[in-house]
Amino acid sequence: MSDCYVGEIRQFAFPRIPTGWFACDGSLKPISEYQVLFMLLGTTYGGDGVNTFAVPDLRGQLPLHQGQGPGLTPRTIGATGGSEQVSLTIDQIPQHTHTFFATNTTANAATPGPTVALGAATNGDNMYATSATGSTPTVLSNVACGLTGANLPHENRMPTLAVSFCIAWQGVFPSQQ
C-alpha cells in the first residue's frame, strides 16, 4: 500500500497483516531494521530506545485522540486508561429508595405490574391484588432492603466488534507543518 504514511494506523476487516504493515500488538521491533518508523514513534509505546522500540498495542484498547477538549482531561500520545472491570462502592451509587404498594385486598393475580399491589395472603399462586383501593406507596426500610452484592467487579466495556489494527512501516514519511 503505497498511499499510506509511515506510522499511520488503519483498521482491516480481515485477519492477515498486509505487506509493509505490523499488527498493533505491542511487539518489539529492531531499530536497525525499522529506523524510519522508530524516528516517529521513539519509545512512546515501549522498547529500550537503543536496540528496540514497540508498536502500539491496541488489543483490548479503544483508540482515543490525544490532546484536551473543552471540559476534558488532557491525553498524551501513548497514555492508557480505563478498566475492563470495575467494582462499585456505596459512595458511587446515588441514594435512592424503593417503594411498593401493599393492600389488605385479597390477592387475585400471580404476576407483578405497575398497577397491582402486594395483596393479602391467599391459598395458591396469587400474591398481587389488581384492585387495591386506598393503597399508598410504602418505602422499604433498610432492614427490608439492605446492602447486597458480592463485592466482585463487573464487566465495564461497551459493545465491540473486533477488527485488525495495523501500523504502516512502509510508505510516505509524514512531513511536519
Image (cartoon, rainbow, N blue to C red):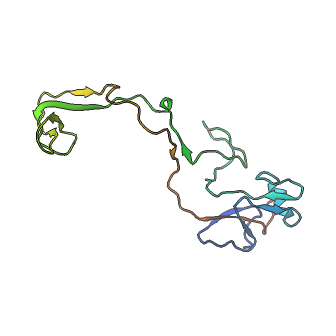
Front residue of 6 and 127: 127
Q: Residue 154, percent across and down?
A: 50, 45
Which residue lies at the image location 31% right of the left edge and 25% below the top edge? 141
Q: Residue furthest front?
A: 123
Asked which quadrant contains residue 55, the reply is bottom right
Which residue lies at the image location 72% right of the left edge and 57% below the top edge? 56
Asked which quadrant contains residue 26, the reply is bottom right
Which residue lies at the image location 86% right of the left edge and 67% below the top edge? 33
Q: Is residue 97 above or below residue 43?
A: above
Which residue lies at the image location 50% right of the left edge and 55% below the top edge? 159
Front residue of 84 and 141: 141
Q: Is residue 139 left or right of residue 170?
A: left
Q: Is residue 132 above or below residue 45?
A: above
Q: Residue 59, percent across and down?
A: 64, 58
Asked which quadrant contains residue 130, the reply is top left
Q: Residue 39, percent across and down?
A: 85, 57
Q: Residue 100, percent across and down?
A: 25, 32
Front residue of 11 and 22: 22
Q: Is residue 176 above or below residue 91?
A: below
- Image quadrant occupied by the N terminus: bottom right
Front residue of 21 and 8: 21
Q: Is residue 14 left or right of residue 136?
A: right
Q: Is residue 54 left or right of residue 75?
A: right
Total labels: the figure holds 0
Q: Is residue 42 left or right of residue 58?
A: right
